[in-house]
Image (cartoon, grey):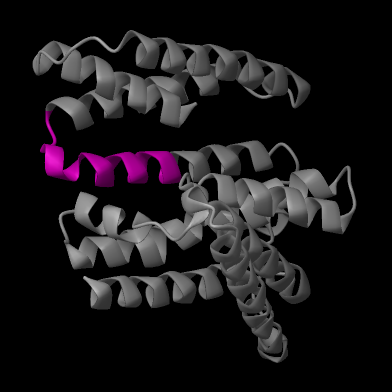
Amino acid sequence: MIIFLLEFLSVITKIILNNENLELLTILFLSLGIFINFFLIEFFRIRIKFSSILIRKFYSLIFFLGIINNLLIPENYNLIAEILIIDLGAIYLIFKICKEFDHNPLRWLGLNNIKLKDSKYFLYYFLAWPLIIIWGIIVEYLNIDILRNSNYSEEIVNALNRNYLVIFFLACIIAPLSEEIIFRGFFYKIIKQKYNTWLAIVINSFFFGVIHLSPSAIIPASILGVSLSMIRIKTQSVYGSILIHSLHNLFALILTLQAL
């Protein structure tokens, strides 16, 4: 809902201020996304008896921040502001929702201290690499162009104007923290309450892959998601998956910068 709303505001602002052509299909798609999300939110809000007033206040704030981002913040920094609004907004809402399940949201989300002896489970990270390599070989062998390695990382670096300090902050701190809380914390726990552990791992990992948007990144990110889920389960802490996710992004960032 946050993503659809911010994108809708961005498109409308560009049409009004920059006299860009009206993209009717884009407007309809974003409007439909907001409309569907509204009813999904209302459906789940009623089921968990969540405050409608808090929801309205939350999205009013998102709307206000979106307007500020498009009108007052320089275009070069719009993407940074959007990422912060989406990630921090999602975490805030998740913590509010978790209070409906447990008075201690940190405990419910799995944000527990890691025991030193459990650090051996970080090695599960390396199980992902053979599968990612095999997937790459299959894609090359079958000559599936859309699934080949894209310039996804390079596009992000360029979109952030090669401000390496900001890129490090977003890629190695904000992204691992927010994505792990959302997927290995909240999403995993919700699915696990109704289904078995492996199904919870597969579902949260698949959607973790999907949010990377690039077709070439979906399967590798999903495989990584499985590895991070196993670390989260074995260490009984999301902090473990946050740490490994952060190191993974740092490694990917270094390789991207060397390539550039």
Q: In the rendered image, is residue 205 in sight?
A: yes
Which residue shows up at 39% across the image and 56% down it?
A: 150
The answer to whether residue 100 is above or below residue 20 is below
> Horizontally, is 102 left or right of 147 in the view?
right
| Image spot of residue 11 (x, y percent) | 27, 20
> Horizontally, is 72 left or right of 23 in the view?
left
> Dominant secondary structure of the magenta stretch?
helix
The answer to whether residue 28 is above or below residue 116 is above
| Image spot of residue 105 (x, y percent) | 65, 50
| Image spot of residue 143 (x, y percent) | 54, 57
Is residue 2 magenta-colored?
no
> Horizontally, is 129 left or right of 46 in the view?
left
Q: In the rendered image, is residue 115 in sight?
A: no
Where is the C terminus found, in terms of image quarters? Answer: bottom left
The answer to whether residue 227 is above or below residue 195 is below
Which residue shows up at 43% across the image and 57% down it?
A: 175
The answer to whether residue 64 is above or below residue 171 is above
Which picture quadrant has residue 101? Answer: top right
The magenta-colored residue range is: 72-88
| Image spot of residue 231 (x, y percent) | 69, 73
Which residue shows up at 34% across the image and 45% down it?
A: 84
User: Camera-side residue: 209 or 165?
Assistant: 209
User: Camera-side residue: 77 or 205?
Assistant: 205
Which residue shows up at 52% across the image and 74% down it?
A: 243
> Horizontally, is 242 left or right of 198 in the view?
left
User: Camera-side residue: 125 or 119?
Assistant: 125
Which picture quadrant has residue 173? Answer: bottom left
Is residue 80 magenta-colored?
yes
Q: How many marks?
A: 0
